[in-house]
Structures are given as structure tokens and as C-alpha cells.
Amino acid sequence: MGVLVFVETENGAPKGSALEAVSFGKAIADMVGGENVALVLGSMDGSGGDSLGSAGADKVLHDPNQEYDKGLIAPTSSAISQAVEASGADHVVFSKSSLSDSVAARVSIKIGASLATNLVSVPQKAGDGFQVRRSIFTGKAIENAEVSGDKVVFSIKKGAVEVQGGGGAQNPETVSYSISDSDLKANIIGSHKAEGDVLLPEADIVVSGGRGMKGPENWGMIEDLAKSLGAATGCSKPVSDMGWRPHHEHVGQTGVKVGPNLYVAVGISGAIQHLAGVNSSKVIVVINKDPEAPFFKAADYGVVGDAFEIVPKFTEALKGAN
Ligand SMILES: Cc1cc2nc3c(=O)[nH]c(=O)nc-3n(C[C@H](O)[C@H](O)[C@H](O)COP(=O)(O)OP(=O)(O)OC[C@H]3O[C@@H](n4cnc5c(N)ncnc54)[C@H](O)[C@@H]3O)c2cc1C
């Protein structure tokens, strides 16, 4: 009985989305009984146990083997399955990421559990299972579904739950899971790390620019606005296709899906493929000189006007307010 939460880290610290998963796990443990156990694989800095405990972990397990830092699917899936077996957990929680999308499915098969993905809120208990709300059709609709079974694997979208806070700090317990040679068949020969102070998929605020910015030389304006808001920067697909911005900033159906509290779109028309990546945002602000731009239909606040006049004024106003 109980819940196991897989915690992804960034530079040794639990990601914000992983802390949400821990708070989600706490809510599930309150429904099904048992402990809410957080599992960290690979490097973790000394304060990890504090933030995980505060977010609602009753216990923190840590396997420090640095093989896991490579983010390989097979050893990660295997370690989580071993942890489930050893802890007796019957519910497993993942925060959605490119790694966990693959791992959650494998773990559900390995442990014989039902799989509920893309959850946007904490489910309700219903009979021997749960009633869940999940994002479908690349975020264009919400599905209400029932998931049954003694064992369930949940994968949650960013913002599905607020990090609780207030739990006690936890001293991580060191564990060691076996990694077989067949788990290490994939070999990473190089990786390119996304730059920036705030990572786009994790960001609470995103400022994105589109083709309306006219060229890469004007991106200082977007970066200044992002800096005054403590935001990550994003862009539309043509902008990254033209090489104005790196590909990891491309937001949309074929790029990064974001779910920030605030999404500011500057000079982006709002094509359906772009909206598919931003429609989990809590508040959308659109700045566009064309009052007919489709993005205004999805916006909570819209400013019709020239970005080159509005954005610097917006940034100045924010600096004055800080
Ligand atoms: C299969 C497929 C997948 C795709 N996936 C994605 C995706 O993941 N993400 C994505 O973004 N796109 C994607 N696209 C492309 C998408 O259809 C649009 O072409 C793209 O989003 C348009 O980018 P944009 O809004 O920056 O450019 P444009 O459509 O050229 O719009 C520029 C906007 O800037 C405004 N503007 C111009 N000057 C100013 C100014 N001075 N001040 C203020 N506003 C100004 C204009 O009014 C206009 O609305 C995909 C397309 C296909 C076919």
C-alpha cells in the first residue's frame, strides 16, 4: 500500500514539476492510505530532502548512482519498478516530461498497473479506482475518464496541483538498485543543454516572440521583458526555423508544451499549432498590431499595437513597479 513518486532533478535539485508530483502523491496517499515516498535517482544536492519533505514526502529514497544522470529510459524504468516492489507501493506518480512519458508506460507494464496520463488535477476516488481529468488532443480538450485497478500509474501535467509546502524536512535514505548490461544498451554520445536562467518547460512565466519581431537583432526587447518578469523566453516555430532563436525555445504542437501562470505572446499570430503548446497557461497576454490576429480569441488580456512601442514601455513600467 502507498505511493511512490519519481522525482526528476535539475542540477541536483528537484524540479518544480517534481515537487508538484510529490504534493499530488500526498493527496493520493491520503485517499488510499500508506506512505508517500519520493524516489530520486542520480545526483541530488544536500537540500533535496528538505524541499521534498516540505512538498509532502513522508520518506525520501535516493540512489546516487550517476548512471541515472544520463536520463536513460531503461535503467530508470528498471530502478523505479524495483523501488515499487521493495516499498510495496501500489500507486506511482510521474510529472510529465520527455523522460517520464516513456518511463511511466514501461513501469505500468512492468508492475501490471493501469496508466493515467496528462492529468490536469487531483483525481477523485471512484469505486476501486479513480475519476480523472486529463488533457487530450494536444491540450484542445479535457477528458473525464475512469481508471480502475489495484495499481495505478499517474502522470501529471505541470500545474495539475499546487505545491503544498509545510511538510517536515526528510533525511534521504540511500538505496541501490541493480542496473543490468541490457539496460545500458543506449549510449549518449553528446548532449546540448538548454541555456537561460529559467527553463522553458518549468517556467511559471514565459515571454514568447514571433515573426512580428522582424529579426533576431530585436530579441533584446523580449529578453528585457522576460528578465523584469523572471520569465523564460520562447518563440514560434518559424522563428526557430529561421535560426533567430534556438530550437529548444520553439513552443507549440511540434515544440515545447508550456503551462505557466502567465504566457506573454509578442508578435505571434496564434496559429492552432502554436496554441496547442500554450493552452494550459493560466493567463495569456497577447501583444499584436493586428486586431484580427487569432491569438486574441485565446487571450485573457490583449494589447493591439506595435510591439516595438509597447514592449519597452511594459518593461519600464515593470521596472518602476519592482
Ligand atoms: C504540421 C505543422 C506544425 C506546426 N507546429 C508549430 C508549432 O509547434 N509552433 C508554432 O509556433 N508554429 C507551428 N506551426 C506553424 C504555424 O502554423 C504558424 O505558421 C506559426 O505559428 C506562425 O508563426 P508567427 O505567429 O510567429 O508568424 P506569423 O503568422 O507571420 O505572425 C506574425 C504576427 O506578428 C504580428 N506583428 C507583425 N508586426 C508586428 C508588430 N510590429 N507588433 C506587434 N505584432 C506584429 C502580425 O500581426 C502577425 O499576427 C506548425 C505548422 C505546421 C503545418
Image (spheres, helix red, strand yellow):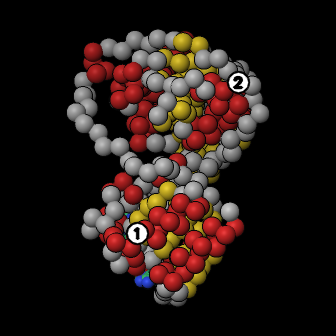
> Of helix, strand and loop, which one carries label 1?
helix
The residues tagged by marks 2 and 1 sit, at their Cα atoms, a distance apart of 42 Å
- For this orientation, the residue located farthest to the left is 189
Residue 75 image position (x, y, % from top left): 37, 22
Q: Quickly name the residue at label 1.
A: 219
Q: Quickly name the residue at label 2.
A: 169
Tally of numbered discs = 2
**On the image, which quarter does residue 235 sit in?**
bottom left
Where is ligand 1, by quadrant? bottom left
Task: Give the mark toward the camera: 2 or 1.
Answer: 1
- Side of 201 relative to 47 (left or right): left
> Of helix, strand and loop, which one carries label 2?
loop
Asked if ligand 1 lies within 8 A of label 1, the reply is: no
Q: Three-letter amino acid code at disc 2? A: Ala
Residue 291 image position (x, y, % from top left): 52, 88
Upstream in the sequence, badge 2 or badge 1? 2
Residue 232 image position (x, y, % from top left): 50, 56
**On the image, which quarter does residue 303 sit in?**
bottom right
Q: Residue at x 53, y 76 (%)?
A: 312
Q: Residue at x 36, y 54 (%)?
A: 248
- Side of 74 relative to 14 (left or right): left
